[in-house]
Image: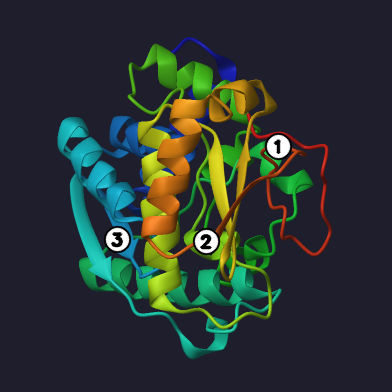
Amino acid sequence: MINHPKYKNLISYLKNLGSAVVAYSGGVDSTFLLASAKEALGKNVLALTIDTPYIANWEIEEAVEICHKLNVSHKVVKADMIDSIKTNPPDRCYLCKKHLFQTLISIAESEGLNHVLDGTNNNDLSDHRPGLRALKELKVKSPLKEAGITKNEIREFSRQLNLPTWDKPAYACLLTRIPHNTEIKEEDLTRIEIAEKFLIDLGFKAVRVRSHGEIARIETDPVHFSKINDPEIKSKIIQKLKSIGYKYITLDLEGYRMGSFNPIEEHSKQIN
């Protein structure tokens, strides 16, 4: 076990829960939480992944693969997009979280598991996270937050535990690529997913394709600007993105920013 007071406090907190469902996305935070829950609760933990039209397929596949490696019980639950978020309202994250976690709570009850856990960490409290209100209303527990564990500590602890996600870039649902108050079409989500996967496969680990109708606005770390402007790579990107329906392919000169469509933007904030 990791010899750090925060990690020891986390394990102690989890043991006291007795049993739990972990809301599992396959990301850095939820993977660390799941591994810690397994350490503390053994077989009394279940990972649940919600598969919606606005979650990239490769994310679901990675979640399944990681749970298999961790030898943790795992279920993938299909969920449609609820009507209240089909126009991508500013409170979309709250509405979505509330609906999805109500589903997780129902499954936890049917499985006889005591609690539902999510991977909110100490840094999330200072960010624009409307979904946190839903978690509070539903009494979902956030053990990483309770233990005061930061994002950097999660990455370091994950590295020490040899978790494959320790250096995985942050990733959010595909709805964050579309402006608020815009009708969500499934073909747009598919197009965004294909475009981002293509860029990731080209080596752009931190990347977003913000979709403005016919315009694809690529956000990536400024250190990659020279790479994206390499004639051969640029030609591949233009060809691929035009082949899936974009008419104009642009590079955002402000670079990769967390939540650039948020109501209160923090343009200077870079994703770790």
> Going by the image, does 159 lie left or right of 170?
left
User: For the residue marked with disc 2, what is the amino acid?
Assistant: Val
Q: Which residue is drawn at 82% across and 53% down?
A: 265
Tell me if label 2 and label 3 are in contact, CB under 8 Å.
no
- The residue type indicated by label 1 comes to Gly
Q: Which residue is drawn at 53% across and 39% down?
A: 170
Task: Work out how far the residue at label 2 is from the one at label 3, CA to CA, in angstroms.
Answer: 13 Å
Q: Nearer the viewer, residue 73 or 227?
A: 227
- Do callouts 1 and 2 mark residues in contact (Cβ within 8 Å)? no
Labels 2, 3: front one:
2
State left or right for residue 8 relative to residue 269. left
Residue under numbered circle 3: 113
* Callout 3 amino acid: Leu
Q: Which circle, 1 or 3, is nearer the viewer? A: 1
Q: Which mark is residue 255?
A: 1
Q: Give x and y (percent) for residue 261.
A: 71, 60
Q: Where is residue 182 in the image (x, y as percent from the top left)?
A: 63, 79
Viewer can see residue 27: no
Q: Which residue is label 2 attached to?
A: 140
Residue at point 82% right, 44% down?
Answer: 267
In terms of image quadrants, where is residue 14?
top left
Please name whichever residue, 7 or 217, is drawn nearer the observer in this view of the structure: 217
Residue at (37, 64) in percent of width and height: 190
- State how far apart marks 1 and 2 are (Cα): 34 Å
Left or right, residue 226 beside residue 52: right
Quarter that holds the N terminus: top left
In 3D space, how far apart are the residues under numbered discs 1 and 3 (Cα atoms)? 43 Å
Q: Where is residue 264 in the image (x, y as percent from the top left)?
A: 84, 59
Snapshot quadrant of residue 110 = bottom left
Which is more N-terminal, label 3 or label 2? 3
